[in-house]
Amino acid sequence: MEIMVDYRYSQIYKDKTVLVTGHTGFKGSWLCAWLEYLGANVIGYSLKAETNPNHFEHLNLKITSIIGDIQERDKLKDVFETYQPEIVFHLAAQAIVRYSYVNPVETFQTNIMGTINIFEACRSCKSVKAIVNITSDKAYQNREKENGYREDDPMGGHDPYSASKGCAELISASYRDSFFKDSGVLLASCRAGNVVGGGDWAEDRLVCDVFRAVAKGEKTQLRNPQALRPWQHVLDALSAYLLVGQRLLEGDESVATAWNFGPDDKSSICVVEVLKLIKRHWSQAQYTIKRDEKNFHETSLLRLDCSKAKNELHWQTKYDVEETFKETTLWYKSYYEKNEILTIQQLEKYIQG
C-alpha cells in the first residue's frame, strides 16, 4: 500500500492562496482556522454572519475577509482576479432544510446559480488549479434504505434544500466534463451531513437548539426524537475536505470526482440518544417532545457508504460518536459558563492526538 503524507501535517497549504466561500459560517470558519494554522494565505468570501453570537467573529483570524454574495458574478470575478487563488473551497450555501420550505426561490438561487457563478469565476482565473465543492449527503434521491448511498447512486431531493444540493452535484459533474477536463483544473465534490461542533448557532439544527436552551435554562423541544442520523465532528469532515484539496493540488486526477465522507454505522444514533450523550457532560440538558405542527417532511433515515474514501484515500473519522458529542458539549459549556473559545485548543488536540 502506498504511504500517504498525513494531511494533518502536510505542508502543501503553507503559503498557498486559498479562497473559502461561506467563511463566516460554521464549517467555513473552522476551515479558515485550520488553513491559517497550516500557514495558508486565506481569502474569505461570504455574506455577513447571520447569527449572533458568531463563531467566525470570535476567532479573530488574520485572513482577508470579503463580504459579498455568490450571486454577484462581477464582484466574484474581481475578487478572483485580485487575489489569484490556487485552490477554492466552496461552502457558501443556504443550508437549512426547514428554511428552504419557506424560501425555496432563495435556496435554489443560492445553491444552484451561486455554485455556477463560483465555477465561472474559477474558469476565468488562470491561477486556480483545484476546486473542492461541498454539497451534502441529502443530495441523494433518498429511499430510506438501510444500506448507505454510494457515490454513483442517483441524485434527488424531496425538499428544496436537498433538491438544490442534488442539482449542485449534477452541475459539478457537468463542469468537470465540459470545461475543466484537460484544462489543468481539478474539481471534486464532497458529500457529508450532520456535522456538529462548537460555534454553530444556526436555527433549526438540533445541537444548536439544545445548547441555546441549556444556556437559557430551558428544555429542548424535540420534533422527531427517533430520527436516525450519522453524526460526525466538524474536524473529521474538514480533514476529508483538506485531504481532497491536497490530492487535487498534487495533480491527482483520480480524486477529481464525487466523495462520501461520514462516520461508521455505530455513530448513527437517534435524536434522543444524542441528548443523553450531551447530558453526560452538561447535566442541565433537558428535553420535551413536541411534534412538528407544520408537518414538514424530514428524512428519518440517511446513511452514506464511505468505503470509496476509506479504500482510495485511506481516510477515516478520528472521533466516534461519544467523543464527537463530548468535544462539542465541552466547547459550548466553556463558551456559556466561562466565555472561552476552545476552537484552537480542540484543533490542536485533534491534530496532535
Image: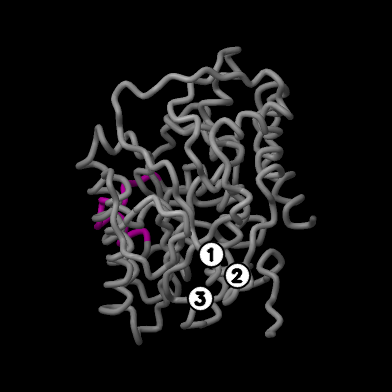
Q: Residue at x 35, y 53 (%)?
A: 142
In this figure, which colouring scheme has been used for the structure? one colour
Per the image, the residue denoted by label 2 is 310
Q: Residue 5 sits in which quadrant?
A: bottom right
Position of residue 250 relative to residue 134, above or below, is: below
- Which one is closest to the eye, mark 2 or mark 3? 2
Which contiguous range is marked in magenta?
67-79
Q: Label 2, label 1: how many angstroms apart (C-alpha)?
A: 6 Å
Please identify the residue farthest to the right as the structure is shown.
353
Q: Amino acid at mark 3?
A: Leu
User: Closer to the camera, 24 or 177?
Assistant: 177
Please identify the residue farthest to the front as the structure is shown.
146
What secondary structure is found at the residue carrying circle 1?
loop
Please identify the residue farthest to the left as the structure is shown.
105
What secondary structure is found at the residue carrying circle 2?
helix
User: Closer to the camera, 56 or 262?
Assistant: 262
| Tag of residue 248 | 3
